[in-house]
Image: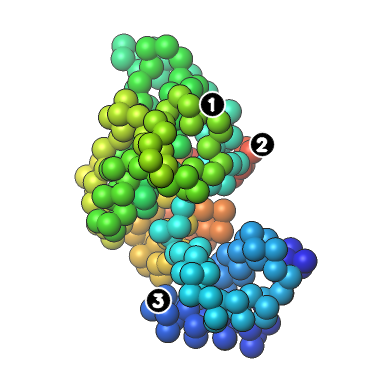
Amino acid sequence: MADDVFLSDSDFEKYRILIYNESGIHFTATNRSILESRLRERLRDKHIDTVGTYFGTISSDKEELKSFLDAITTNLTRFFRNQAHFDALEHHVVPELIKIKQAAANPTIKIWSAGCSTGEEPYTIAMLMSEILPPLWKYDIVASDISLKCLMTAKEGFYADGRVEGVPDSYLKKYFDKVDGGYKVHADIQSKIRFDYHNLKNDAGLRNMDIVFCRNVIIYFDEAAQTNAINHFYNSMASKSFLFIGHSESLFGMDTKFEFVKTQWATLYRKFM
C-alpha cells in the first residue's frame, strides 16, 4: 500500500523533471525525502498503491497534477495541519506562557504565523487560543507571507466547503458563518489577526513575540538563507518563547541559539534568554 512506497532513483528523476517542467520548483537529492513524504500523503488520499501508477495519473489528469503541485509547495495548507503541533501548543506552550505572564496587568500572548499562505494556520491558532486562554487574557497574531495572492485570500477569510475539512464541527458553528459555497470566518476572529506582506530574507521588525510558527517554509531555502531566517526569528522573539517549524525541518547543525524541546506531543524549539 501507499505506506510502503519507495521512491527509486529512476522514479525520483521522472518526478523531478515533471515538477520542474510544470512549476519551476527544483528538487535535489537533499530534499528528496520531502518529495517522498508528500507523495506518500497523496497516494494515501487517492488510494493508489505505487508511485509508478500515480505518475501515470498526474501525466494524464491535469486536475490531479494541479493538486499534486499544490501538495509539494508551501502554499498548500489546511486547518489544523499537523495536529500534534496544536496539541503541543495547547498542553505545553500556552500553560508555560501563562505561568510566565500571569503577574502581568494585561496579559497578552503575541504570535507570529510566518509563511501563513491562505490563512488556515493563523485562523486555527486564533480559534484554539480563543478556546483555551483564561478569562481576561488576550492574544495578538501577525500573519505574513511573500504571496500577495495568498494574503488576499487569507484576509477575506472565505473557504470553500472542501477547505474546512479537519475543522471540528463545534468550531465551524462557533467561529464560521455558513455562506453560499463555503464558510466565512467570523469578524471577531479576523480582528485578532493582522495580515502583512513579508519576505523572510529580511527582518520583519517584530519584537517580543511569544510564539512563532514557520512550518514547511525553510525547506525551500539553502543553508545560508535558512540560518538567516532563523536568526531573524530569534531576534523577533521574547525571552522564554517558542518556535514551531515543520516536521520535515530541523535546526540540527545550524548556527543558532535556539534550544531543542521534546514534548509529549511534538518537538519544537525555545529561546530561553
Query: In which quadrant is the C terminus drawn?
Result: top left
The answer to whether any part of residue 40 appears in the image is no
Q: Residue at x 47, y 45 (%)?
A: 161
Label 2 neighbourhood size at 10 Å, few (<14), some (14-19), many (20+)?
A: few
Left/right placement of residue 30 relative to residue 237 reads right
Q: Is residue 18 above or below residue 149?
A: below
Q: Position of residue 69 (x, y in %)?
A: 47, 69
* SS for dot 2: loop
Occupied quadrant, residue 137: top left
Occupied quadrant, residue 23: bottom left
Q: Give the residue number, with chain letter if any, for mark 1.
A: 170
Q: Residue at x 37, y 52 (%)?
A: 117
Label 3 is placed on what type of residue? Answer: Ser
Q: Is residue 272 above or below residue 21?
A: above
Marks 2 and 1, how far apart at CA: 25 Å
Query: In which quadrant is the N terminus drawn?
Result: bottom right
Marks 1 and 3, how far apart at CA: 38 Å
* SS for dot 3: helix
Q: Position of residue 16 (x, y in %)?
A: 52, 81
Q: Give the residue number, with chain letter if any, for mark 2.
A: 264
Left/right placement of residue 127 relative to residue 205 reads right
